[in-house]
């Protein structure tokens, strides 16, 4: 499997973010891809860019999707 890095952009008290984090954790753990969470409210630029669409999934620094994890599509991106 190719080496990738996943970042999940979130904010506190966001139910959709909690659901997405659980999905990202499960999938990344299964395929051995490192991932991290970044709170958009901790940085004005991130809040301006992602704030109205969280959760946002970045794969290798590029936006992959937002609001929910599309599992089949996400797994395909990590398999490239």
Image (tube, helix red, strand yellow):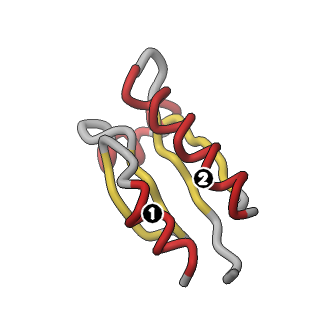
Q: Position of residue 61 (x, y in %)?
A: 51, 68
Q: CA distance from mark 1 to mark 2?
A: 9 Å
Name the residue located 43 percent from the left edge and 55 percent from the top edge.
Answer: 71
- Answer yes or no: do the residues labelled 1 and 2 have beta carbons within 8 Å? yes
Q: Given the current orientation, which residue lies at the most extreme top position?
A: 13
The residue at the far left in this view is: 52
Closer-to-camera residue (80/34): 80
Q: Mark 2 falls on what kind of element?
A: helix
**What label sits on residue 74 in the rendered view?**
1
Q: Nearer the viewer, residue 74 or 51?
A: 74
**Spot occupied by residue 60 in the image (x, y as percentages of width and height):** 55, 71
7, above or below 75, in the image = above
Query: Crowding at label 1, few (<14), some or many (≥20) Cα neighbours within 10 Å?
Result: some
Q: Earlier in the sequence, mark 1 or mark 2?
A: 2
Q: What SS does tag 1 mark?
A: helix
Q: Is residue 15 above or below residue 59?
A: above
Counting from the top left corner in percent of width and height, residue 67 is at 30, 41
Q: Is residue 59 left or right of residue 44?
A: right
Quadrant containing the N terminus is bottom right
Q: Please name the residue shown 46% across and 38% down the image.
A: 20
Q: Residues within 10 Å of mark 2 (few under 14, many from 20)?
A: some
> For the C terminus, which image quadrant?
bottom right
Q: Is residue 76 above or below residue 43?
A: below
Q: Which residue is mark 2?
A: 27
């Amino acid at each position: 499997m190719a080496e990738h890095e996943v970042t999940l952009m979130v904010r506190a008290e966001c139910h959709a973010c909690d659901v997405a984090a659980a999905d990202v954790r499960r999938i990344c753990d299964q395929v051995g891809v490192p991932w991290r969470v970044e709170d958009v409210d901790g940085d004005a630029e991130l809040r301006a860019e992602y704030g109205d669409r969280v959760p946002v999934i970045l794969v290798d620094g590029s936006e992959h999707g937002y609001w929910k994890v599309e599992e089949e599509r996400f797994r395909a991106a990590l398999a490239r």
